[in-house]
Amino acid sequence: MISLTEAGRRLRDPYWWLNRVHGPFTAMHRRFALPGFDAGKAPRIVFLIKLIGREDAADWDGVVARLRTTLESVDRQEGDGISVFLCGQDLPEGLKTRHELRFVPAPKGMNRIQGIDKQAKHRIGARAIVDQLDGPAYVVMLDADDVAHPGLCAFLRSDNNGRGYIVTDGYMWDVNRPLVTRLSADSSGMPFDEMCGSCAVIGVDLSRKRTAKRILCTLPLNHQVLAPHMAAMGQPLDAVPFPAMIYAVNHEDNVSSKFGRDGARGWLFADHGVRGPQAEAVLREFGVSAP
């Protein structure tokens, strides 16, 4: 049972209401909006990262260190037209990136859902992307502690379906040691997108401002329903055909750990985890050094 305070926050959140009219909303979108963009056009690629505020962080120095690791994974992406939009209350000092980095300030005291302000930051960052950029784009949802495969952008450009992609195959990494487990239906029975929010790549034409905002700003908070939601919007996502992300866990500021929702991690590491040289080889493939 939720508290009256939490109930009030939900009632003030537009996504709480949107979930209750999901069918009519997606039907109207399919009827009047064009999905994605023309697959023949060369897209820009935008990584949208939401950063926890300094006041909310249990270990701000650790937050900044993990953000640097995340940004380094973007720096390893090849090609032009790559941007990072970083939304948060505080911009860490001395951030350097090879690709374009834009900081989108978020206000303090934002509306939270179950104690988390990530969805509000997502909306602020998504609106900034649409307002500041134009043309076809893939918007990659990337948490501020996760790691993208260095070949992700090259794949998006070469395959370029114009609709978007879902990461169903990736790894979960215990950041305190060289311990990883493969997250996919075939390897562990747990698809990556069931566990981690860094799993969606959404195709939008940023020149069609209203449609782009409708698509990006109404993505569900629950990453487990992202793929069916986008299919209902008339824009089904294709699976990325290789392990494309690392989900970093077991640090103090991981959202699931912070709010006691560790779920299946324990048995996934116990039953399917690999350690030592095998884990280090996986991390090296992503450009990450083992702790």
Image (cartoon, helix red, strand yellow):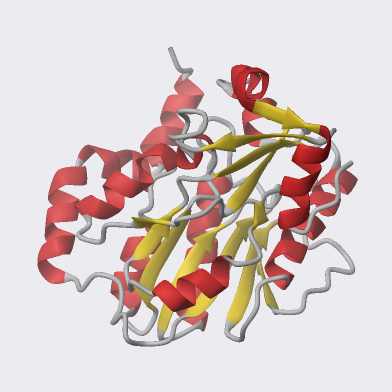
Q: Residue at x 76, y 79 (%)?
A: 98
> As rendered, which of 81 and 106 lies closer to the eye?
81
**In the image, farthest residue toward the front:** 277
Q: State the image coordinates of residue 259 (x, y, percent, origin top left).
A: 63, 25
Q: State the image coordinates of residue 87 (x, y, percent, origin top left).
A: 64, 61
Q: State the image coordinates of residue 96 (x, y, percent, origin top left).
A: 83, 73
> As rendered, which of 226 and 52 lies closer to the eye?
226
Q: Is residue 286 left or right of residue 190?
A: right
- Image quadrant in which the C terminus is located: top right
Residue 176, image quadrant: top right
Placement of 102 over or under 256, stated as above or below: below
> As rendered, which of 178 and 60 lies closer to the eye?
178
Placement of 142 over or under 175, stated as above or below: below
Q: Residue at x 25, y 61 (%)?
A: 235
- Answer yes or no: is residue 9 visible: yes
**In the image, farthest residue toward the top:** 1
